[in-house]
């Protein structure tokens, strides 16, 4: 997958956006959607995606980039409020050599705590009820 790979409508995040695959949603609006990472690196690991079909930072429109970072900021505040971490990573990987594994652009929001080791990237599935509980905690903060 190079940086110029065309968008594939059948990627898993496109299916989530169309409602064809499940997700633990925390937020949505006309242009963005946020949900729990199914293989979290830390508890509270959340993903934010644009509705615009873009593979990575280099085919994303400026308007979609603007709304994507706005929602990432909003959701990061809620993740911080829900989990009280020592730090929060907001990260985006463009291209497989950079670590991208799903080819619909997304920002990761990953809480971190001093002395707590992160899980490996996209390695171990979390239980659905745990993800549902974490999504509820973040959604509750978004409502305040
Ligand atoms: P990246 O490697 O930056 O492309 O990140 C893709 C992320 O998507 C990884 O952290 C995966 O754990 C996560 N992921 C893959 N499939 C799903 C899914 N169906 N629902 C939620 N997260 C997913």
Image: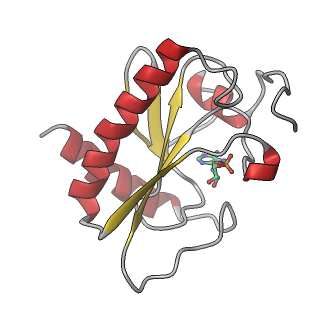
- Residue 112, above or below 95: below
Q: Residue at x 69, y 66 (%)?
A: 123
- Depth check, front residue: 17 or 70: 70
- Residue 24 in sight from this viewpoint: no
Q: Position of residue 89 (x, y in %)?
A: 44, 57
Q: Which residue is drawn at 41% across and 86% down?
A: 115
Q: Which residue is drawn at 60% across and 31% down?
A: 16
Instruction: Give the side of residue 65 with respect to residue 101, left or right.
Output: left
Q: Where is residue 100 in the image (x, y as percent from the top left)?
A: 72, 47
Instruction: Give the side of residue 6 with respect to residue 88, left or right.
Output: right
Tell me the quadrant of the picture where the C terminus can be found: top left
- Residue 76 in sight from this viewpoint: yes
Q: How many numbered marks does the figure carry?
A: 0
Q: Which residue is drawn at 53% across and 64% down?
A: 127
Q: Which residue lies furthest to the left in this view?
A: 144
- Residue 30, above or below 38: above
Q: Residue furthest bottom?
A: 115
Quadrant hosting residue 131: bottom left
- Residue 79, above or below 54: below
Quadrant hosting residue 52: top right
Instruction: Give the side of residue 92 with respect to residue 109, left or right.
Output: right
Q: Position of residue 5 (x, y in %)?
A: 85, 27
Tell me the quadrant of the picture where the N terminus can be found: top right
């Amino acid at each position: 997958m190079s940086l110029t790979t065309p968008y594939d409508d059948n990627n898993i995040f496109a299916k989530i956006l169309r409602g064809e695959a499940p997700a633990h949603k925390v937020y949505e609006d006309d242009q963005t959607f946020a949900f729990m990472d199914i293989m979290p690196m830390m508890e509270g690991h959340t993903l934010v995606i644009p509705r615009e079909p873009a593979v990575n930072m280099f085919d994303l429109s400026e308007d979609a980039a603007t709304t994507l970072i706005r929602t990432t900021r909003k959701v990061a505040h809620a993740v911080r409020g829900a989990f009280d971490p020592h730090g929060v990573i907001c990260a985006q990987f463009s291209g497989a050599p950079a670590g991208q594994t799903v080819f619909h652009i997304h920002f990761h929001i990953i809480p971190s705590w001093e002395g707590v080791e992160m899980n490996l990237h996209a390695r171990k599935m979390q239980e659905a009820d745990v993800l549902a509980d974490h999504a509820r905690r973040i959604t509750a903060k978004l409502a305040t």
